[in-house]
Amino acid sequence: MESALQPIIDEFKVDAFDALHFKLLREKSDLQEGESFNPEMTHQIFGESEKIFGYKDLNVTVAVMAGSLSTYVDIKYSEKISPNLSKGVEPDDIIKEMSKIYDEKLITSEAAFWETFEEELSFRPFGTLKSGYTLNKGGHAHEFVIYHVDQSADNFDEFIKYHKRMEPFLIYFIDGSSFITLDENWSFYILYEKFTSHSSPEKRYGLVGFLTVYAFYAFPEHVRPRISQALILPPFRGMGHATRLLEAVYDDFVPLPKVVDITVEEPSVEFQRLRDFLDCKRCLQLNECVQQIKLAIVSSNALATNGHTIGADGDTPSCPKRRRTSVVASAVTLNPASPFVCVAREKLKLCRKQAYRVYDILRLFLLPRTNTEAETKYKNALRERTKIIYRRVNVKSMYTDPTSATVNGDMEKRAESLLMATLMDQQLEQEVTALADSLWDSYSSVVQKLDEAIEAGDFTVDKNFP
């Protein structure tokens, strides 16, 4: 009987992704006619299953005023599950579950929601205007502005309330995100579209996205700014807005002598890609960086042709420990990337890891596009370096050296260790190959974007070598 009822009960379960629809309202008519977009994750609200139980044909509209972010939740469904069918299990309380991530009480009355429209019409950004730009879309010019807010702002107390209205978007669109505890070390970069409307003769502002930065202390009297959260709302993605926000951060922090470097907290794949592009572009626009990477390429080519390539035949010590030590020592003494990394860190405030990553991407960028042999050599070098790094981090924890058993030791255990070592070596090869392929795809994507930017006339690069 229960199995026969299960298909009927399943009709009252819906994916939260499909049920929730966000709308950014600029005019009252947008509630019915405006475009909507779905959340990308809901597990922090509706659990790991990300299902809502108890409703058939469920539609939850989350209407948000574009500027002031006043929020109204409208829930519609064709039928609620009966207690007899659910055996006493109550339908999910959608408003209660959603309220977990909102500081203010959610508005559930449309009439009460429209009472906040006057607040929307008078909304003005907090903080200080940093920059602005115009983009053409659909044959129309759209104006965007970036504001910076920190505790020095006159209206920071009011901004705290506004920030609590912004934060719920993080839960819906950034995996593993959490709310922050405000202190004097936080800075906020908030992007708005500046637009005109029929409802007001004055220019109005609609939220596009935001980025947060925390300035960590660095001994003895320095700081290391870390980008913590970065979000562009779905209707505005693919237009270069995140890059503009990151540029605003660089413009503020790079010139400061007290800044050691600028880091990013667990960047997503998308954010790392735009970060790579922007950092590569900045390096290519700095003559010192360009000269250093060209010299590095010439230097590394000279080392190879002079027979000093690390790991060349006849040059490798037979003892495994000496071989590892030799590779590390040679990498330190013959590392052609070091001068470039020093310049990138000093002039552009790239952290060490990112500077080396940019170096690798720019080496690929400077390869002739039709030179397949050079491309193959680059791939092989990338794979070998990945293997060295991967082994250094993982290999000791993977298995016990089978040669450590004595001749008179337990031969069965030794055989097991040999088998385990063989299997782990195969696994290592697979993982290294997958990681190297992933890096190659990521680097190639950035190189393609750099080529497109140069072709579009965004900047120029001299690829001639000394």
Image (cartoon, rainbow, N blue to C red):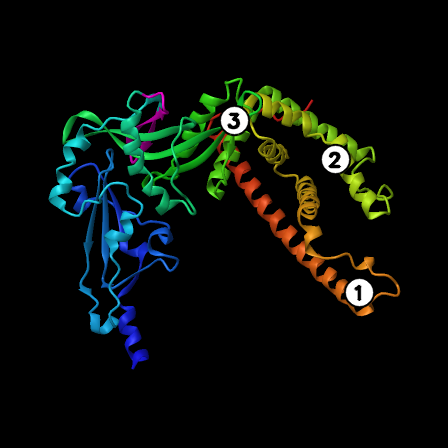
Q: Would residue 334 be seen by someone viewing this image from the given angle? A: no
Q: Would residue 300 be seen by someone viewing this image from the given angle? A: yes
The residues tagged by marks 1 and 3 sit, at their Cα atoms, a distance apart of 51 Å
**Label 2, on which residue?**
331
Amino acid carrying label 2: it is Ala
Question: In the structure shown, which secondary structural element does the residue marked by tag 2 occupy?
Answer: helix
Q: Quadrant of residue 85?
A: bottom left
**Label 1, on which residue?**
414
Q: Are marks 2 and 1 in contact (CB under 8 Å)?
A: no
Image point (28%, 33%), residue name: 162
* Residue 407 position in % (x across, y down): 88, 63
* Residue 357 position in % (x across, y down): 60, 35
Q: Earlier in the sequence, mark 2 or mark 1?
A: 2
**Relative to the observer, which residue lies in front, 466 or 314?**
314
Amino acid carrying label 3: it is Tyr
Q: Is residue 74 above or below residue 140?
A: below
Question: Of circles 2 and 1, which is in front?
Answer: 1
**Label 3, on which residue?**
217
Q: Is residue 285 above or below residue 361?
A: above
Q: Which residues are magenta?
A: 133-153
* Residue 302 position in % (x across, y down): 77, 30
Q: Quadrant of residue 211?
A: top left
From the viewer's perspective, is 323 left or right of 101? Answer: right
Image point (72%, 31%), residue name: 335
Q: Earlier in the sequence, mark 2 or mark 3?
A: 3
Question: In the structure shown, which secondary structural element does the residue marked by tag 1 occupy?
Answer: helix
The residues tagged by marks 2 and 3 sit, at their Cα atoms, a distance apart of 31 Å
Q: Is residue 152 magenta?
A: yes
